[in-house]
Amino acid sequence: MKQLFLIGFRNLIQHKRRTLLLGGAISSVTALLAFLLCLSAGIHETMLESATTLSTGHINIAGFYKVTAGQSAPVVTQYKKLMEIVHRTLPDLDFTASRGRGWAKLVSDSGSMQVAIGGIDIANEPGFRKVIKIVEGNLDVLSNPNTVLIFQQQAKKLEVKVGDNLVISAQTPNGTNNTGDLRVAAVARDVGIMSGWNIYIPADSLRQFYQINSDATGAVHVYIKDVKKIPQDMELLRKAFADQGFILMDREAKPFWEKFQSVNREDWTGQKLDLTTWEEEMSFFNWIITAIDGLMYVLIAVLLVIIAIGIMNSMWIAIRERTREIGTLRAIGMHRIQILQMFVIETFILGCLGSVLGAALGLGAAALMNAAHLPVPQGAQLILMSNTFKFTIVMKPVLMGMALITGSATLISIIPSVHAARMKPITAIQHIG
């Protein structure tokens, strides 16, 4: 076997032009695959970071409170007790944060828009500062009553700046209409489509506006150290809350605002908890990653077919050119299986070298672009949820891609290799190329 590897390697060196052509094609496809895998991982990581900062935790303890059977509000009572249970139950807990929830009309002197309101305690939100980049004002001012954080596109649409006044108008859980005055504390850089409708005010100001008591909030966001443990932690929390006498809603992989209609149809009153993961709350964005991954795999599949055809044609030509060599090898005692192995090993070596070089180039390009912080076009920011391209180096998928490309190239070489192995020695030696 060692001799066959040596023969294969020497043949690749001898036929440099063909080796460079096929090796370059394999390297290009591998580099593109590695680059796209890093981009996909970066988008997923950015979405996780943005989503778990702007509107959801890794796990969300939310729910609905119904004063009457036909009227519900996205309110959680006894949230401090719930947070204590979380701290006792989850061994890998990072931190928890309570968030008020609301939907209101935001009005300025020159315009208005519908917005989702997040009630936030800025002093207890360590992850918020990592994602939100302030372009005007001061984030710490958001701890003052009746202040608001808005984003660049919102400020542009409403034609306001830091220090200007805004008015919010909405219906409270008890059915009355209410309005409140807010002062712009800070304007943050847009972070994709979600920043188009989210604003943030102090949690106490939101409670006062919606006329709910201090022991109620919209949701408790739970952040854990290892997101892979979300399913296990979810089950631990459901059991812990049930043991403490809390009533839980059935699991439904939808964001909370899609559940209003079904909850209002149910005949019950009081409080029910609804536990969801960040992916369930952001399920309406899953098409982004699905579409990007789908396009990536279609592109790679097309390129693999082209490479397979190229390898087939190249090997048919190589076998034709080396027919007398094959005859000589058979005449001196090399078996058919060894001829087959020789050509397959040659392609395998070529695939390995090409995929390793391509992966290095793809990962290098991804690392360079990530370091360059290339800006994302305004339109693409809505989809990528970031104002710069982010690439995350992921070795496991890249290694699997390398194995797939090398394996495909090796398998496709078996067909012409079988033809070479079946040649009769006397006929092959007499062949005139």
Image: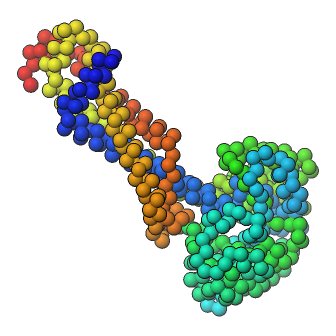
At a point 52% along the width and 62% down the height, the residue shown is 384
Closer to us: 262 or 385 = 385
Closer to us: 355 or 170 = 355
Q: Is 304 rendered above or below residue 8?
A: below
Give the farthest residue toward the left: 432
Q: Is 315 rendered above or below residue 35?
A: above
x and y, in percent, of residue 155 in the image: 60, 82
Quadrant for residue 25, please give it. top left
x and y, in percent, of residue 430 in the image: 8, 15
x and y, in percent, of residue 201 in the image: 74, 75
Whether residue 283 is visible to the viewer of this picture, yes or no, is: yes
Left or right position of 393 against 66: left
Quarter the C terminus occupies: top left
Quarter the N terminus occupies: top left
Left or right position of 364 against 332: right
Give the farthest residue toward the right: 245
Give the farthest residue toward the bottom: 109
Quadrant for residue 232, please give it. top right
Closer to us: 385 or 186 = 186
At a point 76% along the width and 68% down the height, the residue shown is 123
x and y, in percent, of residue 193 in the image: 57, 68
Left or right position of 12 against 59: left
Left or right position of 153 against 299: right
At a point 23% along the width and 26% down the height, the residue shown is 10
Q: Is 406 rendered above or below residue 271?
A: above
Whether residue 54 is visible to the viewer of this picture, yes or no, is: no
At a point 75% along the width and 46% down the height, the residue shown is 92
